Image: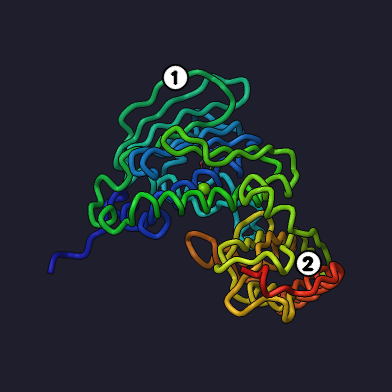
Amino acid sequence: MAKIHQLDSILADQISAGEVVERPASVVKELVENSLDAGSRQIDVSVEDAGLKSITVVDNGAGIPVEDLEMAFHRHATSKITNRQDLFQIVTLGFRGEALPSIVSVADVVMETAVEGQPGTKIHLQGGKVLEKTASASRRGTKIVVSDLFFNTPARLKYLSSIQTELAAITDIVNRLALSHTEVAFSLSSNGRELLHTPGNGNLKQVISAIYGINVAKQMVEFDAEDQDFKVSGFVSLPKLTRASKNYVSFLLNGRYVKNSHLNKALIQGYGSKLMVGRYPVAIVMIQVDPLLVDVNVHPTKQEVKLSKEDELCNLLAKSVYARIARENLIPDALTNM
Ligand code: ADP
Ligand code: MG
């Protein structure tokens, strides 16, 4: 065996990149989350060949000052938290400082960024190395183009699914991000074809309509409830509108799309006996809670979170959905439940 030695930082980034950027959709998620954290009101995503050829994200957020730009691509470099206390009170989507270094270690990246009133900068990196850094036009915001994803990690490339599956994963994540940030105008296009466009006017029903279609939106009802720790609100489908998978349910915890089987169960419980076995509602559930009650630092992608008082939240959700559905006073109709 060779002597024990420290891996060089690019190799280390490539290894940990596997956790953060599994597939093109995870790159899209990380980039859009950065745009959201930068306070953008408009975010345009375009992909070529399901992101394998290129992923472009353009935002009108705060931008990165020229003196910080290279640092942004270093591992564990972040502007979002500074001390231990911050870690227990995460209010941004990112904080681990892992996405950009992971992405640049396995792709070709060009970023153009400018802060308000200052000249912009353009930086080109490949496989973790800076190739060029120049002055550029100064429109406030950031444009990032990621091409040749996984060019230097052939095993990862081979493991990817078909173009359709990867594109579906991208659409899915952009949909959830758009649902969780109705105040931001999103667009998504694939090989020049527009797949999604949201108005960015804060109207959740319009975003639901843009994503799932107006007929789905029409069969959904608004609900809200709160107790001393949680606020829940959003839209749930009436029992006659169901789907064969859970994919049409989104839990948005303090603006973060999260997956949680207990919340799923609580939602279904809220329908009492009105859902047929194996059928699921369409639902967008916003949850507001003190960040102190949430541990986001469970998994690199942050889609699983640990929640104190989860039982209390599940109860609140089940009860409020039940009450809302009961109010519609609908008799479940097995025939329309297809
Ligand atoms: P994290 O989001 O966890 O901080 P990233 O590696 O994703 O880590 O990004 C590193 C830093 O780069 C961020 O903390 C932020 O300061 C800056 N940054 C990245 N993308 C953008 C963007 N679109 N607009 C403004 N700043 C950005
Ligand atoms: Mg980030």
In this rendering, is residue 249 above or below 169? below
Image-quadrant location for residue 65:
top right
Give the residue at x 64% y 37%: 185
Image-quadrant location for residue 248:
bottom right
Q: Nearer the viewer, mark 2 or mark 1?
A: 2
Horizontal side of 162 relative to 295 (left or right) equals left
Which residue is disc 2 drawn over? 230
Give the residue at x 28% y 52%: 157
Horizontal side of 113 relative to 250 (left or right) equals left
Task: Identify the element where label 2 is drawn.
Answer: strand
If you read the primary sequence from the N terminus, does the residue marked by circle 2 or circle 1 appear first?
Answer: 1
Which residue is disc 1 drawn over? 135
The amino acid on which the numbered mark 2 sits, given as a three-letter code, is: Phe
Horizontal side of 163 relative to 330 (left or right) equals left
Q: Is mark 1 within 8 Å of ligand 1?
A: no
Please tell me how crowded label 2 is: few (under 14), some (14-19), or many (20+) other residues with Cα within 10 Å. Answer: some
Rendered location of residue 161, percent (x, y) = 33, 57
Rendered location of residue 255, percent (x, y) = 66, 54
Q: Is residue 247 visible?
A: yes
* The N terminus sits in image quarter: bottom left
Q: Is residue 98 visible?
A: no
Please tell me how crowded label 1 is: few (under 14), some (14-19), or many (20+) other residues with Cα within 10 Å. Answer: some
In this rendering, is residue 128 above or below 137? below
Image-quadrant location for residue 289:
bottom right
Viewer-closest of 169 and 157: 169
The amino acid on which the numbered mark 1 sits, given as a three-letter code, is: Ala
Residue projecting furthest to the front: 335
Disc sitting over residue 236 in the figure: none
Viewer-closest of 138 and 275: 275
Give the residue at x 68% y 59%: 284
Give the residue at x 52% y 36%: 194
Task: Identify the element where label 1 is drawn.
Answer: strand
